[in-house]
Image: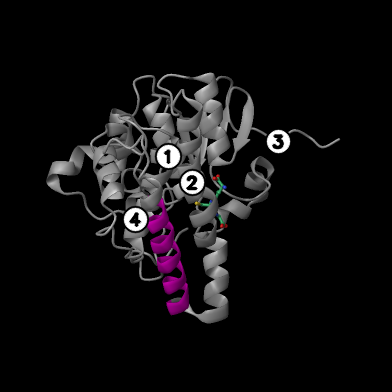
Amino acid sequence: MTEPPSTTAAAGEIVLHDYWRSSAAYRLRIALALKGIGYRRVAVDLVAGAQRDPRHVTLNPLGRVPVLEIDGLTLTQSLAIIDYLDETRPSPPLLPAEPAARAQVRALALAVACDIHPISNLSVLTRVEELAGAEAKARWNHDNIAQGLAAVERMLDHPGFTGRFCHGDSPTLADCVLVPQLYNATRWGVSLKDLPRIRQVQQSCAALAAFRDAAPERVAPVADTAPPRQADRRLTSCDLRRISPPSNQLHLKRFQGNKNRKGQRPALGTEGP
Ligand SMILES: N[C@@H](CCC(=O)N[C@@H](CS)C(=O)NCC(=O)O)C(=O)O
């Protein structure tokens, strides 16, 4: 019999194994924030290969983030984790009550999580670059995201689309998954100009603190963020404790900076998953 995975969480503690630029982890940060669940973050630096560290692989045999330690469990797969949160902490719900609407929301989330995101994963991009070069990698990723989002735009043309979120007037699982993909789209120069429904969703989500607080730039290692504008100063990662949920157990762990050899921050779209 195999040993149960080791845990890093103290009794009753919730721990998120996270990488600031991981869109799968970003989904979960949004869901946790929407539900007001506090947690401690543990940084897994994907660019440095920390996901392959045996201690992390013990938690997630696939060597990926996110991993959530909660209720004495070690959970992997962002969508399964969000389902678990919704079942054990149902308020606010992240799925509509009605079966057809639930199917619609799940379809949108799966379109991103299963059809768009895996083809843009770090390991896939690295392999494409090895085989065909950096330009081919950028084009591969750009075209995959652009085509995928064009399909999502068409999927949003459904009776439950009210012009705010992916379904109805409150955020659901679909919004938790779509918004991180839009962050990736921006990084890789994919225009949202011809995607009006997606832009409406993006705008509605940006108005909510849960989405803003979960954003990569809010949780980035200090060395990887541009200096904050004066107006945003209270929202830097150093101040995260102040803007996390009230039941907050979140202790921001200072990440190792991902500087390049010259000590500079990498350009957008050049590193990370
Ligand atoms: N299906 C997984 C995907 C997880 C995933 O692909 N995570 C990426 C970051 S977005 C990762 O850890 N990549 C590490 C690698 O490719 O080496 C989920 O939804 O949790």
Name the disc covering residue 174, or none: 1
Percent position of residue 148, x then y? 44, 58
Residue in the image at 65% along x and 45% along y: 55
Report, in whole angstroms, how far the alpha carbon at label 4 lies from the one at label 3: 32 Å
Q: Which mark's residue is nearer the viewer, 2 or 3?
A: 2
Q: Amino acid at mark 3?
A: Pro
Report, in whole angstroms, how far the alpha carbon at label 2 lies from the one at label 3: 21 Å
Q: Is residue 207 left or right of residue 219?
A: left
The residue range painted magenta reads 135-152
Q: Amino acid at mark 1?
A: Ala
Determine the secondary structure under disc 2: helix
Mark 1 residue crowding within 10 angstroms, few (<14) / some (14–19) / many (20+): many
Report, in whole angstroms, how far the alpha carbon at label 1 lies from the one at label 2: 13 Å
Q: Which residue is mark 2?
A: 24
Q: Is residue 52 magenta?
A: no
Percent position of residue 236, x then y? 26, 42
Mark earlier in primary sequence (4, 2): 2
Work out which residue is located at the far front of the displayed protein and give it.
159
